[in-house]
Image (tube, grey):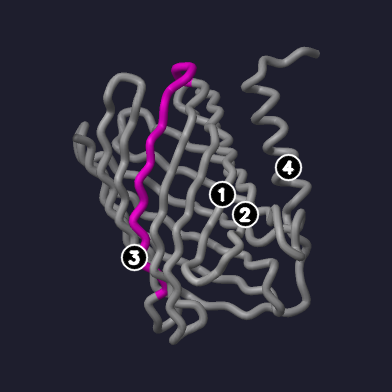
Amino acid sequence: MNLPLHKRILVGGTVLLLCLAPARAREYSSEVGTMWGFFLSKQIGRVNLQLQQNVWTLGRYYERYMPILSVSYTAIPKYVKLNALYYYMNQQTPPGTYNNRNRYQLGATFSYPVQRFSMSLNSRFESTYTVGTARPSNKWRNKLLFSYAIPDSRWTPFFHADIFLFLNGSRANTIDRVWYDAGVEYRIDHKNSIECKVREEHLISKNPQQLNTFISFAYKLKL
């Protein structure tokens, strides 16, 4: 059976998620944190510009301050977008050690809307440069997104799963971590909305492996 390209991409992404999902480890450490975000976006024709401001905590500590600038271009309406992002991170890891990082991402989002359902795969190359370190950390990230617009409602529940794969260094071609997000977006009006979610983070590359839970709140404004 010949499936359209966007369907084949979504099926392939789903298979990838199932194949790469980590087996249960014998030992875990865990922390609980928060994520606070502000999103400002502007649509200009097929181009979307977005500025984010993010502050994360983990346990009792400040974990990162992370502004993000992103540009996306709608190549095929409803189905394909091309993305470029720049991150600046001031990150504390481990507690008491602060690093400044510059991160770049290039990728594409493949979507398939079905009535009120939306299914997407966001695949992108990521390169992170830490100040004082010569070699960047390169990863391939694949994020599956599912959402549903409830009829006659301003609420849109969603689920995301994001897989990080090392591309260089001694751990190349192994999984770094997986993020699982479940939440809801509430549309205040056509320009303003708020988002609440819970993120479960599985740090597979750590020994012992780490399971973190983040409670997230974000405000979104469209210009």
For label 3, the SS is: strand
Task: Tell me the residue that label 1 is attached to.
Answer: 126
Q: Nearer the viewer, residue 14 or 51?
A: 51
- Mark 4 residue crowding within 10 angstroms, few (<14) / some (14–19) / many (20+): some
- In the displayed structure, does residue 201 sit left or right of residue 99? right
Question: How far apart are labels 2 and 4 at the CA level?
Answer: 19 Å
Task: Tell me the residue that label 2 is attached to.
Answer: 138
Q: Quadrant of the N terminus?
A: top right
- Is residue 119 on the magenta stretch? no
Does residue 204 sit above or below 143 in this rendering? below
Q: Quick one: label 2 or label 1, which is nearer the N terminus?
A: 1
Question: How far apart are labels 3 and 1 at the CA level?
Answer: 20 Å
Q: Nearer the viewer, residue 183 or 10?
A: 10
Are the residues at dot 3 and dot 2 in contact (C-beta closer than 8 Å)?
no
Are the residues at dot 2 and dot 1 in contact (C-beta closer than 8 Å)?
yes
Look at discs 3 and 2 and give the one toward the viewer. 2
Question: How far apart are labels 2 and 1 at the CA level?
Answer: 6 Å
Question: How far apart are labels 3 and 2 at the CA level?
Answer: 23 Å
Q: Quick one: label 3 or label 2, which is nearer the N terminus?
A: 3
Task: Tell me the residue that label 4 is attached to.
Answer: 16
Question: How far apart are labels 4 and 1 at the CA level?
Answer: 18 Å
User: Taken as a whole, is the magenta stretch helix, strand or loop?
Assistant: strand
Tag of residue 176: none
- Mark 3 residue crowding within 10 angstroms, few (<14) / some (14–19) / many (20+): some
For label 1, the SS is: strand
Looking at numbered disc 1 in the image, what kind of residue is underneath it? Glu
Q: Give the residue at x 28% y 28%.
A: 43
Looking at numbered disc 2 in the image, what kind of residue is underneath it? Asn
Q: Give the residue at x 70% y 53%.
A: 167
What span is in magenta? 63-78
Task: Tell me the residue that label 3 is attached to.
Answer: 55
